[in-house]
Amino acid sequence: MPRTLNVTVAKVGGSLLRPGEVDKVLGKVVERHLADDGKLVIVVSAMKGVTDTLIRAYDEGEPRLIEDAIQPYLTEAQRLSLGKLGSVIEGIGARLKGLVSIRELWARDYVIVHGELLSTMLAEAALYNSLGVDAGAVYDAGIVTNEDWGRASVLGVSSHYVRHRLTWALSRRSVVVVPGFLGISLNGRLTSLGRGGSDYTASLIASYLNAPRLIFYTDVEGIMTGDPRIINDARLIPSLTHEEAYVASLTGAKKFHPGTFKPLIDSDVHVVVTNPWSSSGTLIMSKCINTPKLVSISEAGSIGLVSLKSGYAVTVVGCVMGLDEFRREVYLIIDSYGPIDVINDTEGNAVTSIVKDQDVAVKLAKELHRWVVSWIR
């Protein structure tokens, strides 16, 4: 698709949309991207913890939890003097309370995607009314899915609808706010794309619009070489390829939706993972820098690279893992921990070892991480 719009797609994570901070965060994002007279699509997540609360409300059939879920939005609406929005949010809360007792899968998806819808309402109002930004919202961006409730798959017709709806909206507004995480089935039902689905939404939109830039704004500076909760000396990765980022998302790195980077493979979309107030970040591009990039640990059932019923998968990600000299060094480290099954990614972007014991998996990950950072220096 030819590039006709100077548009940036920015995904704003729920950990940034905290009570007392929403207008500051959105103002900073707009400030960073509208200086060049371009257009901006902001994809928003639910506020942190809201989706979990909505899931509990439905699964437990507990209307009281709906009040807990909508309260942060009511608090922000009051702080920003958005009285009409507060009334709308209360009305939505009343509707959701009536749905938590309906034992149908469509009803569950309907309830749990409302964190993103509420974030979209709040973001639009904060931008337009509080910050004076020429902003509008598109609540149905045109992402069409099947009805695989809880993890709906996106259908090919989405590209046409997204381009049509967002191009039209961007012709009338400088900034358009879109909810992440959700789609619409061919029967008109709200569906959810699965955990981390807002990241996936942003990538799909950037791909469909052939946007030159896609920025993932998070509460950290970028993607790290290892999980800081396990790897004490984890550091920021300067750059990854789209393929490396895709493999990393499959292993659970940064908790991205596993499909996040797939639409961007073979594209020239300039991707950055960063913090709104940071000048650094992780650049994701088509060119491979010939070093290993990161180490991840995934528990059974949570990794997309292999089918794992028990134990832990320790994965080294990097486009160089297809080269014999790098694989040999990784194998030597793995072999020092005894007989361990090893699986190579067919595209040469990862080597995964299957470890039964958690302590062994952590020790192996730390040693592999020392090897990884020795190449990055």
Image: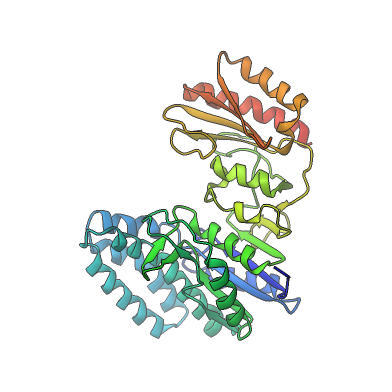
Q: Is residue 114 left or right of residue 44?
A: left
Q: Is residue 261 visible?
A: no
Q: Residue at x 57, y 71 (%)?
A: 160
Q: Position of residue 308 (x, y in %)?
A: 46, 31
Q: Is residue 242 left or right of residue 118?
A: right
Q: Residue at x 70, y 64 (%)?
A: 213
Q: Position of residue 274 (x, y in %)?
A: 65, 56
Identify whether 11 is placed above or below 83. above
Q: Name the colour scheme.
A: rainbow
Q: Residue at x 55, y 43 (%)?
A: 250
Which residue is more in the foreground, 291 or 304? 304
Q: Position of residue 102 (x, y in %)?
A: 21, 62
Q: Residue at x 54, y 73 (%)?
A: 161
Quadrant for residue 318, please give it: top right
Which residue is more in the foreground, 347 or 197? 347
Identify whether 338 is placed above or below 344. above
Which image quarter holds the C terminus? top right
Q: Is residue 129 left or right of residue 288?
A: left
Which residue is more in the foreground, 78 or 335? 335
Identify whether 341 is placed above or below 143. above
Q: Is residue 105 visible?
A: yes
Q: Position of residue 110 (x, y in %)?
A: 34, 65
Query: How many numbered circles does the render carry?
Result: 0
Which image quarter holds the N terminus? bottom right
